[in-house]
Amino acid sequence: MEIKRVCAVCGNEFTARNHNAKYCSYECVKIHNRVKNQRLRQEQAKTPKQSREHNLNRTLYNLHKYNEENGTRLSYGQYRAKIETGEIAI
Ligand SMILES: [Zn+2]
């Protein structure tokens, strides 16, 4: 039995080989995946929470490195204060 479907990407009618098929060709599957990934990336870029976390992680990493290199035991707050006064250049 042949299943006639309309491709969700290019709109061409095609014969589906199984009930789950939504796209007429591998090319259209690739296009669909690319669009989906782009949308995901855009949404992630828009989320401020994630970028804040990223910045925090980077600061903590730099703090750890600074303490290692200088033999200090600065807390996060002390480290931030030194950045703000310009004592530590980032
Ligand atoms: Zn197609």
Image (spheres, helix red, strand yellow):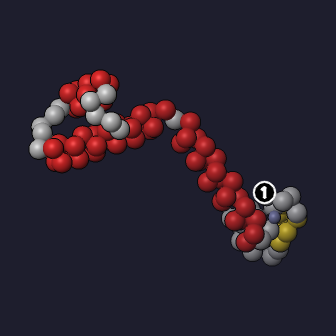
Q: Residue at x 88, y 64 (%)?
A: 13
Label 1 environment density (alpha carbons within 10 Å; few <14, some 14–19, many ≥20): some
Give the image location of residue 47, x and y in percent. Answer: 52, 35
Q: Is residue 72 visible?
A: yes
Give, as a three-letter code, the residue at label 1: Ala
Name the spot of residue 87 as percent of width and height, x first.
Answer: 26, 30
At 18% from the left edge and 48% from the top edge, which residue is drawn?
69
Quarter of the render that holds ligand 1? bottom right
**Helix or strand or loop: what does disc 1 sit on?**
loop
Does label 1 point to a residue whose CB lies under 8 Å from ligand 1?
Answer: yes
> Where does residue 64 sit, x and y in percent of width and height?
21, 44
> Foreground: 43 or 23?
43
The answer to whether 30 is drawn above or below residue 38 in the figure is below
Q: Is residue 3 visible?
A: no
Q: Where is mark 1, residue-wise? A: 8
Who's the residue at 81% across and 61% down the image?
Answer: 7
Please state if 76 lies on the left or on the right of 40 as rendered: left
| Place of residue 38 in the rendered image (x, y in percent of width and height, measured from the top left) | 64, 51
Q: Residue 55 is drawn in which quadrant?
A: top left
- Residue, x 75% and y 69% (percent of image)? 27
Q: Is residue 83 left or right of residue 4?
A: left
